[in-house]
Amino acid sequence: MSHSTPDPNDEHGSVYDGLLGTDTSQWAFGTDFEDPLAGVDTTVPDGLDAGELAAHCLQLGDDALVMSHRLSEWCSNAPDLEEDIALANIALDLLGQARLLLARAATADPSVVPTLPEGSPVPVEDALAFFREAVDFRNVRLVEVPNGDFGHTVARLLLFATVRLAAFERHTAHRDPVLAAIAAKGVKELTYHRDYAGRWFLTLAQGTEESRRRLVGGLTAVWPLYAELARAYSVDETVGPEVDVVLDQILAVSGVERPEVAPMAGTGHTEALSRMLAEMQVVARAHPRGLW
Amino acid sequence: MRTVTDTAYALAASVTDPELPMLTLEDLGVLRDVRESGGEVVVTITPTYSGCPAMATMRDDLVHRLTDAGYAARVEVSLSPAWSSDWISERGRQALRQHGLSAPGPAPRSGGPIPLTLMPTARAVDCPRCGSAHTELTSEYGATACKALYRCADCLEPFEHVKEI
């Protein structure tokens, strides 16, 4: 037996009609998205270049979005339930940061937002997340490479959270008050992320021979991408030394050396980002008007 | 005499958090402001965590509560200052304990580079069931972004602790 596709524009067409009465607010893909910056003054301060601010927010937002997606791939696959929940929570924090940062990029410079069909209800941060090609993403390669094992994820998260936290601490005094406010929220979250990754780094390094082998393997695998991450977040000259102190502290207590592997050549993205975006974007792209 | 804003504030303050329903938005400290603007009630709330999925529900619940009372209402977001668990009221802390949750201690101080904590976060957490101070951390992350998981070593009760941020 086949069913005809309900037309949500037709009064009698949708099986969901009547489910919510006249209350459309609980409808998952409804007509009224909330703006994460509703009521926030998004005027770009004098003396700041709106294009540069938008580009920087896109970079910070894309890193959070892509890292969040990779972490969310652990859902139902983590070594145990507590870690499953922890990784999902960290992914959720980063998704929230991504949403705010992409919305900030769009309000600073609306020209960064892809054009969608007229009447599309997709909000700007979703347009940026779901309707850009891989080549337009500004994230570093560290966050896009596929998940390895848990040791790989811990090593990647430690590098990412340590560097991002140091940069966000400085951004709490950014001349753009919106970015400064997003950073101030993010600092609290990233502190938990860094501690989480640091504890697991130490636990795996000092655990069994097998856990240590996997952790060192993971760190060695992501290390070629570390230089690009450090460069992207060196918002001033003090970030690098501060990050080095933190990483050296964890490496020393864990008895792990910095891997001696060369930085990965080139810039831009790996093939992995296109594959990830294909999965992440497919539903939104199939329904750019938000109707099915 | 009660003004429109007073009445609207009382209504907004009675809305509860969708994930911690024993707390009103006022007790949670996310209700930042209620004002009248151009014949409309404008409510300002702040997210607990950047990705807090309850924000949309809070907004809808506020609009419904005020609309039902005859107000035209709109909800705005305030990002700064960032929410702190220190803003949970004493009444809210009691409500948490009465419902088997442990209330947060003082939020970490800010200023200067944030120290790395490789040992489990040191907190004085009492079991909300038996009051024992002999409790242990199960996980820094729980069913919602704002909670950690604990277990009482005496009565063995597992419970949630609202995290300090």
Image: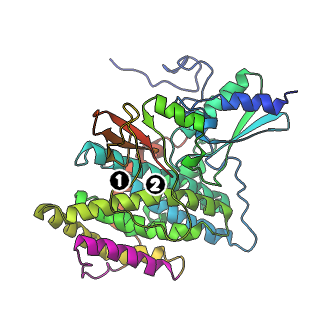
Separation of disc 1 and disc 2 at Cα? Answer: 10 Å
* Sooner in the amino-acid sequence: mark 1 or mark 2: 1
**Residue placed most toward the observer, B128 or B3:** B128
Residue B149 lies left or right of residue A231; in this view the side is: left
Q: Quadrant of the N terminus of chain B?
A: top right
Picture coordinates of residue A260, whole percent (x, y): 24, 82
Up-down: is B99 above or below B115?
above
User: Of helix, strand and loop, which one carries label 2?
Assistant: helix
Provide the chain ID for the residue under circle 1. Answer: A
Which residues are the magenta region?
A237-265
Picture coordinates of residue B10, whole percent (x, y): 72, 29
Picture coordinates of residue B143, whole percent (x, y): 39, 39
Q: Which residue is mark 1?
A: A71
**Residue placed most toward the observer, A238 or A138:** A238
**Colouring used for the render:** rainbow
Q: Which residue is mark 2?
A: A94
The quarter holding residue A248 reads: bottom left
**Dot 2, how many residues are within 10 Å of its Cα: few (below 14), some (14-19), or many (20+)?**
many
Q: Answer whether labels 1 and 2 touch (C-beta < 8 Å).
A: yes
Residue B158 lies left or right of residue B100; in this view the side is: left
Answer yes or no: is residue B136 visible.
Answer: yes
| Residue plotted at (66% across, 49% down) | B78
Up-down: is A85 above or below B119?
above
**Dot 1, how many residues are within 10 Å of its Cα: few (below 14), some (14-19), or many (20+)?**
many
User: Of helix, strand and loop, which one carries label 1?
Assistant: helix
| Residue plotted at (73% across, 74% down) | A47
